[in-house]
Amino acid sequence: MSVAEPFEDGREAGDGRLERERPRERRRAWPELRPHLARARDEARRRLVAHTLGFKLLALALVARAPRQYLLRRALARRRGGTPRCPVPDEVGFRRFTPDDVAGIAPAVATLQRVARELAPHYQELADHQHGRYRIVFDLLSDEQLLDLPELVDFTLDDAFLEAAIAYLGTVPVLRRIGLGLALPDLAHPAPRNSQLFHIDGDDRRQLKLFMAVEPVGPGDGAFTYLPAHVTQRVLAAIPGGRRRGYSYEYFADEEVLPRIAPHELQRLEGPPGTALLIDTSRCLHYGSRVEPGHRRLMLGTFYQRYHVINETPSNWLDPACAGADAVRRLALSPRRVHPPGYFFPHPLRHPGPGARGRT
Ligand SMILES: [Fe+2]
């Protein structure tokens, strides 16, 4: 007997059941298949974009879906033009900041320390709700809290950072994340894993992230550790399949990287609160959060990415009103919105755990 073709009405299908019953059956089957299909699609996409041609094709397809955004953001970036006050040199792919460089750093640290003080009694409880890679570093800031902290959004859109990002990326980027990441020692997994190992962020070929110490960072605290872009390029070229592995979100063991660099090339974001770094994590090998027992690390992390970023990762819902009348800032707070506020980053106490991003 031949397999029944799908019918639109209630005609009897080949197996004797009414076809109108079949969609319900399919609906029951889909939820089980969905995660497998999503994983297969993501894997295929990762393999595609790890290669230069595949990346270019996908990048073109994404621009073709929203060409106006592409043209508008590039035109505004050109108009803003000039040399930013704090440029990120292309060769190294990072720039360090101190509270003397940006007036907003000290007040932002104070705000973040206040948020942290309110949550500090719950740190261990919050950690216990995390699982897998979400235990390594977890977020204390939700979309809901950020709505009450417009000064923090304002700080992350400071000219020092936004103009540097515009010049570096050649477009007006989207501010996708404002995270207050807490890293605690994980006694169950003492060996480095996931983001505690060297890697580059395969979300795109370029992006900038601002990391800022909210509490002092010293030895044992799990400092963000990185290599300049030109050193990364040299290391990835020396590791067989290194570039492809890097853009496929694969991790590199210390033994693969450290013998290929000089000790002074490995840099750490250590220092007092307010010590900050704007870095291209897609071009600079990095790791972090190797927190030793008795230590912890509290750090701000903000992401500036192209509107047409290749692999979208969970993002915050930020209030567009924080942009004011400035056209560039308005674009920075105008991502493609798919999910409602709180979807990826719900309130840490009312909805402990990794939230929806745990399913991505
Ligand atoms: Fe990373």
Image: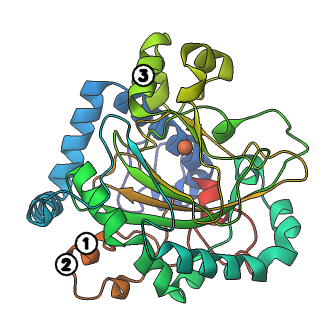
Q: Where is residue 282 in the image (x, y as percent from the top left)?
A: 42, 40
Percent x, y of residue 248? 48, 30
Name which of mark 2 and mark 3 comes first in the sequence: 3
Residue drawn at (19%, 51%), measured in percent from left and top? 63
Above or below, 124 relative to 287:
below
> Mark 3: which secondary structure?
helix
Residue type pointed to by label 2: Ala
Q: Which of marks 1 and 3 is nearer the N terminus?
A: 3
Identify the residue at horizontal 21%, vertical 44% (top origin): 61
CA distance for labels 1 and 3: 32 Å
Q: Mark 2 points at which residue?
A: 327
Q: In this view, does 209 lie above or below 124?
A: above
Q: Quadrant of residue 79?
A: bottom left
Q: Does the residue labelled 2 lie within 8 Å of ligand 1?
A: no
Comparing 225 with 6, the one in front is 225
Which corner quadrant of the image does residue 108 belong to? bottom right
Residue topped by disc 1: 331
Q: Can residue 18 be seen in this view?
A: no
At which x and y percent is residue 233?
A: 40, 23
Residues at circles 2 and 3 in contact by the CB criterion of under 8 Å: no
Please indicate, yes or no, whether residue 292 appears anywhere in the rendered image.
Answer: yes
Q: Position of residue 312 (x, y in %)?
A: 42, 53
Q: Do the residues labelled 1 and 2 touch (CB within 8 Å)?
A: yes
Question: What kind of colouring is applied to the model shown?
Answer: rainbow
